[in-house]
Image: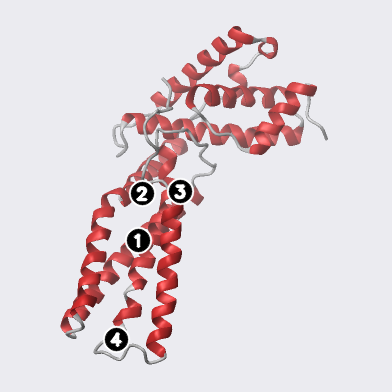
Amino acid sequence: MSLESDSKPDPIQITPWKKAMLLAVLGLFGGTLFEYYTGGINENAGWLWPALFVPLTLYLLGIVYGDVPARYYDLKTLKPFPVPFARQFDRCVLSIVVLFTGLLLNIILLAVSLLLDAKLLLSVFYTLYMALMLAELPNSLRIFRFIQHVNTMQYVSAINPDTFRTAVSYYSPDQDDLKGEVREKYMKSLYGNLVSEAERLVLEASPLAHEQQIALNLAVRAGEAIRRCRLAADEKTSSRLRANLNLLESLENNAGLVLPKDILNLRREVKMTGTVSA
């Protein structure tokens, strides 16, 4: 079962236009604020014009900051999940707080603009922004689902320290000599073992779908293997290093795992020299 997909890229991923939009909104905020303080905006409740961009900025920050952890369980291309969980969990919580702060602030400012009888165009803008935020909200709520699953995984890991089998348990020295179709067959077999391992961790209580859980569990497995590769390289533990490199190669070949540059260089060095330089 491959996690790769030929479908179009996920539109919820961070894209250049989202970052460009955030910078544009910040630019508009700065320009409008300057115009207000220099006397260019002297209408009733004119301070609401520069304030117009504050909730939108917060909401965009929540989307941009929150999309990074959210894409770890997308099925387009497997990305290694960094270990430990805590940093990504904190990032998710912060992005949700910022996102909902922007939405709440926009609602408050819209109410203020109506109470102070501000210019109609101003109220229209606040209403439009609120509509855009609410339209995007279902996508943003995926971050909540991610947090819930990570919390569940942390609990499972706490009560079962051996959540994943050690890479060495899948490894034997004769595998280093496998070539061509034989090695490809071995990698598929190893991938099947990893998927079975990920499936055993699927939980009914998780808010994520079955396939999403498998993808996230494999991403966690990849992140752990990357961490252990680096440790093994520092400690010059050959068998442990090769075993974890095999896991990563299997996920790369069969699930589209994107490996960090240092791991690619490490694998190239091991294949060329059979060892790791000091």
| Residue occupying the point 61% across, 11% down | 183
Q: Amino acid at mark 4?
A: Gly
Q: Residue 18 location in percent, x, y? A: 41, 55
Q: Which comes before the other along the chain, label 4 or label 2?
A: 4
| Residue occupying the point 46% across, 65% down | 23
Separation of marks 4 and 1 at Cα, in angstroms: 25 Å
Say if 26 sits above or below 6 in the image: below
Hey, which quadrant is residue 105 in on the image? bottom left
Give the mark toward the camera: 4 or 1.
Answer: 4
Q: Amino acid at mark 3?
A: Val
Q: Residue 32 location in percent, x, y? A: 39, 80
Q: Which comes before the other along the chain, label 4 or label 1?
A: 4
Residue matched to label 3: 68
Separation of marks 2 and 1 at Cα, in angstroms: 11 Å
Q: Which comes before the other along the chain, label 1 or label 3?
A: 3
Q: Amino acid at mark 2?
A: Ile
Residue matched to label 2: 143
Whether residues under marks 2 and 1 lie with C-beta atoms below 8 angstroms apart, the answer is yes
Separation of marks 4 and 3 at Cα, in angstroms: 37 Å
Residue matched to label 4: 46
Residue matched to label 1: 99
Separation of marks 2 and 3 at Cα, in angstroms: 10 Å
Q: Quadrant of the N terminus?
A: top left
Looking at the image, the residue that sits furthest to the front is: 40
Q: Quadrant of the C terminus?
A: top right
Give the mark toward the camera: 2 or 3.
Answer: 3
Residue 240 seen in this snapshot: yes
* Label 1 SS: helix
Q: Amino acid at mark 1?
A: Leu
Say if 77 sits above or below 102 in the image: above
